[in-house]
Image: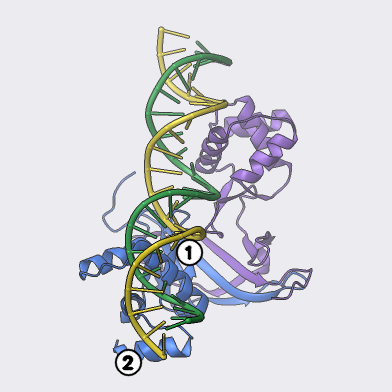
Chain colours: A purple, B blue, C green, D yellow
Amino acid sequence: MLRSDILAKFAELRILSTPQRIEIANIFLEKPQHLSADQIIERLRESGSRVSKATVYNTLNLFTERGLVRECVVDPERRFYDSRTSPHHHFYNVDTGELSDIPSDSIRFEALPDMPADSQLESVDVVIKVRRDSSEKLS
Amino acid sequence: MLRSDILAKFAELRILSTPQRIEIANIFLEKPQHLSADQIIERLRESGSRVSKATVYNTLNLFTERGLVRECVVDPERRFYDSRTSPHHHFYNVDTGELSDIPSDSIRFEALPDMPADSQLESVDVVIKVRRDSSEKLS
DNA sequence: CTCCCTGCAAATGCTTTGCAACTAA
DNA sequence: TTAGTTGCAAAGCATTTGCAGGGAG
């Protein structure tokens, strides 16, 4: 993604631009993907960048607040951040930890429950857990 | 729930019976509910019991493995355990952290996606996030 | 005896925070 | 100047683990 596009996105979301934030946004906006803080740090290191851990965490929180990425809660061990912010759902392979998208139109609801009193809908998140990976590892 | 029922459940699930495990199972089986490790410990303390933290965690892992409770991943801060093990879904109030059940028949799918290659379905978990609590706290 | 459980304390691992130095408008 | 950011190290928390003592069969 072009730097100018990233700057435009930052402006739109009221995110002050810094070199570190641009580097992190650049990884996410390259393509829709699911990354943990650690995976971000790994990617930054690979490309020779030395953004600190604290800054990565702070930046992820900021990006989430501002809607540049979406947190997806699926693994109690660590948080994943999803650069696809449009509504969609996930497959989660419990054996490999792999997380993949389900296009939102391939799940349709025939019925949805009433909301509890005084509360308004925020999101509907479907996680389909699957087992066994392609290498057919036996238990 | 009667002690004899708990013992029967333990036998069925190949869980060795100990006083600590019975106390914890007793809390869960009283009624369907969602509890974190900390909430379990709190409940135990209230009733004068002194089960150690380590034992609570070990027991929750054992109960989950054996299917006495189900882990539900909804809050990145802590794990919740659900004593309703039959298929159903959840409301999660992001303001209050409250977790409540959605009867499984009040959500019906019109379409479900194909599974990825070589993987078999484990579960379909729907979390409907809602905002704002009944006390109408303004932002 | 032998196996397994309990509980304490220590260790782990992810995430947050305090704070001093720095950067940009 | 002045608010806001970075990075380091330290702190925080939920959870796990090591290990000694203990209980059931």
Asked whether B127 or A75 is in front, the reply is A75
Which quadrant of the figure has residue A23? top right
| Residue B68 image-quadrant placement | bottom left
Whether residue A96 is visible, yes or no, is: yes
Q: Residue at x 73, y 30 (%)?
A: A48
The residue drawn where x is 24% and y is 65% is B45
Q: Which residue is mark 1?
A: B128
Circle 1 packing at 10 Å, graded few (<14), some (14-19), many (20+), is many
Marks 2 & 1, CB-CB < 8 Å contact: no
Identify the residue under disc 2: B4
Mark 2 — on which chain does it sit?
Answer: B
Whether A78 is drawn above or below A50: the answer is: below
Report x, y in % for residue A3.
Answer: 71, 29
Which residue is nearer to you in this view: B119 or B98?
B119
Dot placed on the residue nearer the N-terminal end, 2 or 1: 2
Q: Position of residue B61 (x, y in %)?
A: 47, 70
Residue B99 visible in the shown view: no
Helix, strand or loop at mark 2? helix
Cα separation, mark 2 vs mark 1, equals: 37 Å
- Residue at image location 65% in from the left, 36% down from the top: A25
Residue in the foreground of this view, choosing between B61 and B128: B61
Look at the picture and state if A32 lies above or below A117. Answer: above
Circle 1 marks a residue in which chain?
B
Q: Nearer the viewer, residue B130 or A36?
A: A36
10 Å crowding of disc 2: few (<14), some (14-19), many (20+): few
Q: Say left or right for A56 vs A50.
A: left
Question: What amino acid is found at the position of numbered circle 2 in the picture?
Answer: Ser
Quadrant location, the N terminus of chain A: top right
Q: Position of residue C19 (x, y in %)?
A: 40, 22
